Image (tube, helix red, strand yellow):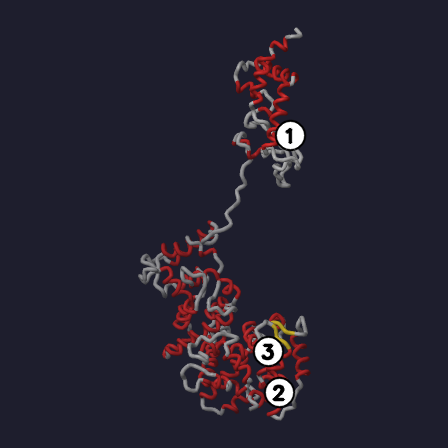
Amino acid sequence: MVEAPAAHAPADLSAAAQVSALPLQVDLLQLPPEVPAPGAPALRGVLDRLFAHWLSLPDTAALVATLVQKAKATGGGGGGAVGAATLPSMMLQGGAAVPPLSPRSPRLSRKPSGLGAGQPNRSASPLRPAAARPAKEVIPQFYFQDGRPPPYEVKKQCISTVDQLFAGHSNGLRAQEFRMVTRELCKLPTFFTTVLFYKIDKESTGFVTREAFIDFWVNSNLMSMDSATQVFTILKKPIRNYLTKEDLKPVLKDLLDNHPGLEFLKSTPEFQERYAETVVYRIFYSLNRIGSGYLTLRELKRGNLLSALRHADDEEDINKVLRYFSYEHFYVIYCKFWELDTDHDFLIDKENLIKYGNHALTYRIVDRIFSEVPRKFTSKAQGKMGYEDFVHFILSEEDKSTWPSQEYWFRCLDLDGNGILTHNELQFFFEEQLHRMECMAQEPVLFEDILCQLIDMIGPENEGYLTLKDFRRCKLSGHFFNILFNLNKFMAFEARDPFLIRQMREEPSLTDWDRFARREYVRLAMEEDGEDASNASGDVWDESLESPF
């Protein structure tokens, strides 16, 4: 019995010899970092000798024999796969059941902090039946390329209204009949009728059928958009994401053709065109803040164009629509330009502009305007201002409290273009004002005193310089600019004309531009009637303060 192990030794050793052929799992040795990599030839030879020596030990032979007997007892027979399955994992070929690596191993990867170590992801296991897996959370759609579809009830009600408006018109509606659809169903000003009509009638048949309207307005989800987005979609070209001046002209043409307050212009088509141009220039002046000439959806939403159009749609007197569409405002702008354009070539040079407001502006500020610092001229003539450029100028000059005008004049005063106004830059422009006051025998005012007044007006964050942001917060920016380059308005402000003060208190909703346009229209109308201009304007404006020269 004692020699039994020896009798089986050769068989056991043959099994051990088979095991010796298996690759050693070196990662399980947990070698320190300073020991060379197992792949190095020197270490590989040492490990091979140590492993062969371990296999030759009697205890190892007994261990292998015991494992083989257990494998036979379980029915494994001579099956190599079953015998191999019962061996320790370090002896398995290919490491099919390798235990987890030690945390000291450099191959250990860090798991996200949100996942617990040792907790497998049971829900993601392919062994679990589909029924046992948790149901996926369904996220509702939140982006719709063509707009969010309207609710079923709203869509049903809209189609019912369409059926009523198109009842009795099997061939469709004509453009004039379509105006009711624009106003009652689309809830848009009727001046969008023409452009909306031809947007649907792509074949120019002269009719818009019920099916075509439903496909354009309902099925494209246009009805569920806000009014600004609807107008933007109707006016813009399909491949663009902005509006140009040309895109607004169909709306102005519809306005001129259908508004009762503009019927008298039908006999003078040339002035219809000038009126439409002026309105478009005013719209872009107010809404297109960056001056790119392209009106974006964001700018359209931020502006008041739609409210002004609705006001014009409800008001028969176009002159009461002070935002953009007043004919009196157009008349003042055009006549002012015509007075300065002495040769009537529709261009104004520097010598013409210096006469504006009875020589109210200084030469230095006019030079800055014609250097195209505040705004690039649209006229192709070198050194000359076109009508569109003049519209921007006069709107900025007569109301310096608006954001576009503040930026216009700030750029003029910013000589080095660094975005701040220093005391030296302010003094440069005031020097000419001081010289003009001396020529008029007015008591001169030292710049140091004026500077204190200017700083108090604006209240800048840093008294060493002024930024455009400082002017945005101030309501006296107009007086600030007038002190520096408009002598007539500077003197009127210093005189504190009681008529102007009373007018401002009685009508606080009017802007400086509205008051100026009203005064000038009265003066121009009386001049046209042949009355004396100075006596007529004396009832409205103190001429001695407006024109000291």
Q: Give SS at disc 3.
A: helix
Read off the residue under disc 2: 434
Image quadrant of residue 46? Answer: top right
Which residue is rendered at x = 62% and y = 31% of the image?
43
Which residue was labeled with disc 3? 478
Above-or-below relation of 47 to 318: above
Lower position in the chain sequence, tag 1 or tag 2: 1
Looking at marks 3 and 2 on the same chain, the residue that comes earlier in the sequence is marked by 2
Q: In this view, does 296 lie above or below 315?
A: above
Report which quarter residue 245 is drawn in: bottom left
| Residue kind at label 3, given as amino acid type | Gly
For this rendering, which residue is in front, 352 or 88? 88
Q: Which of marks 1 and 2 is in front?
A: 1
Residue hosting label 1: 29
Among numbered discs 3 and 1, the one appearing first in the sequence: 1
- Residue 141: x and y, percent? 50, 47
Judge depth for marks 3 and 1 and give the one in front. Answer: 1
Whether residue 54 is situated above or below residue 482 in the rendered picture: above
Taking the image as drawn, is residue 264 in sight?
Answer: no
Left or right position of 51 against 379: right
The kind of residue on which mark 1 rests is: Leu
> For the residue carrying disc 1, how many other residues have a C-alpha within 10 Å: few (<14), some (14-19), or many (20+)?
few
Which residue is nearer to you in this view: 342 or 510?
342
Rendering coords of residue 27 (x, y %)? 61, 31
Q: Would residue 366 be found to the left or right of residue 212 on screen?
A: right
Q: Residue at x 46, y 79 (%)?
A: 385
